[in-house]
Image (cartoon, rainbow, N blue to C red):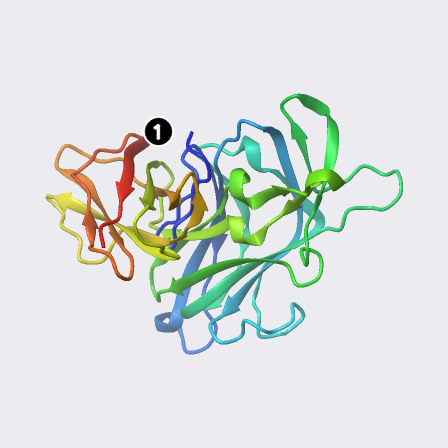
Amino acid sequence: MRNGTVALKTIFVAVLATAATLVYLAGCGGGGGSANKGTLKLSITDKQSDDFAQLVIAIREIRVVPAGRESASDDDPNLPVLAHFTTPKVVDIMQLQFIQTALGEIVLPAGNYSQVRLILEPNPTGQQQPVNYLTLRTDTSTKIPLTTPSGQQSGLKVLGPLEVKPGVINAVMIDFDPNTAVVSRGNSGGYNLKPTGIRMIQTADMVQFGSIIGNVSSSFQQWSSATVTIKRRGSINDTDPIAAGRIFSNYTSGSWQAPFSAFVPPTTQSVSYKAFIAANGFRLYSSPAVTVVQGQATDIGNITLEP
């Protein structure tokens, strides 16, 4: 699996190309009747890692941040609580596959949201076992604590944007790419959980799905972010994408690049998918039509941006 997959948004985000857990969140919005209400489903995804056997986090609460309230504290009453766990919800990211797992429900007004915040249970002090930790494939018995800056106070901020549309299901995935979300502290030992290695993806409501993965790069010109959209082609020709999201580049191996993974329903005989990638200063990329099989990743390879 390629290093550092990304998650895409609103339809999809990509990150993983192999693991995904749909976290189920239903919601209806407040105020004004059903026309102003939207249903939100939340999911967690993960890309496999050659280094880590386990990547465990203990989630105490999940909040959704409306656009314009990014600086609000977690106890702000205007930040809807998507889920609260009296006993923290323990998730081993490395065990997520193409399946669903329920996290909770929330009532949300239709509108735009900029973040999902994961409030984590703090690791205990002293000799107690950590609740946020990883284990290495080379040593599966040793739990190495994960340092999660702000994870217990202001939460791990998973960036959107996210649009909750009225009267429809709005499915969202949170993507953990362990290759970019987890950073070694070097000689000091231990690992940090890096919020910028976590992505949000919005997609269609689906129980069964596969994914489209790829890697976007440019060695000629620096780029910071790009928008990836997936559209159906064939008997259905989408104007609006069935999956879409932003990816962010890192400079590695002589180029600026970012992998992505988009979760979509399997294709049929009459419908395939095309991926479109847009970045400022570059030509719009359009992929060939591809098919997607349930529970599998379709790799469209390395995509080189052209100025």
Q: Residue furthest top?
A: 138
Q: Residue furthest right?
A: 126
If the image is split into quadrants, where does the C terminus sit? Answer: bottom left
Read off the residue under disc 1.
296
Q: Which residue is nearer to you in this view: 117 or 266?
A: 117
If the image is split into quadrants, where does the N terminus sit? Answer: top left
Q: Is residue 95 rendered to the left or right of residue 190?
A: left
Q: Residue at x 32, y 38 (%)?
A: 214
Residue 244, x across and y down, in percent? 32, 53
Q: Is residue 275 rendered to the left or right of residue 27?
A: left
Q: Is residue 52 visible?
A: yes
**Total of numbered circles in the picture?**
1
The quadrant where residue 155 appears: bottom right
Residue 285, x across and y down, in percent? 21, 49
Q: Is residue 189 visible?
A: no
Q: Which residue is nearer to you in this view: 219 or 8?
A: 219
How crowded pointer 1 is (Cα within 10 Å; few <14, some 14-19, many 20+) is rated as: some
Residue 194, x across and y down, in percent? 59, 50
Q: Residue at x 61, y 43 (%)?
A: 183
Q: Residue furthest left?
A: 235
- Which amino acid does the dot numbered 1 rest on? Gln
